Amino acid sequence: MTGFIISGTFKAGSNWKRFTKTVSSQNEKNAIEKVYSLIGSENKLKRNFIEITSTAETRA
């Protein structure tokens, strides 16, 4: 599996907070879906309150 570093922002109250997540996935699309799921469940947010700004592939 390949690792991906996903960065972006999410709505926290009236402010936007930055995040960076590293996830393992077979492709970039699945990695982005996984980050939406993780951020959404950790912060009780819907996808429209999460913005992905960059993705980078890492090889382990």
Image (spheres, rainbow, N blue to C red):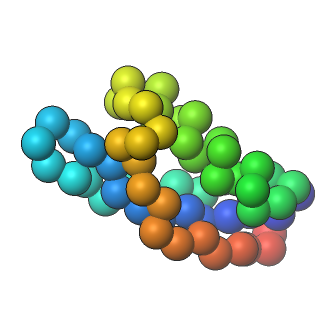
Q: Quadrant of residue 48?
A: top left
Q: Residue at x 72, y 74 (%)?
A: 58
| Up-down relation of residue 19 to residue 49 (above or below) | below
Q: Quadrant of residue 8?
A: bottom left
Q: Is residue 11 shown left or right of residue 3?
A: left
Residue 12 lies, in percent from the top left, at 22, 40
Q: Is residue 23 shown left or right of residue 14?
A: right
Residue 49 lies, in percent from the top left, at 36, 42
Residue 43 lies, in percent from the top left, at 36, 30
Is residue 1 at all visible to an observer of this figure? yes
Residue 51 lies, in percent from the top left, at 42, 56
| Residue that extends furthest to the left in the rendered view of this protein | 14
Q: Nearer the viewer, residue 26 or 33?
A: 33
Q: Residue at x 80, y 74 (%)?
A: 59
| Up-down relation of residue 34 to residue 54 (above or below) | above
How many labels were placed on the picture? 0
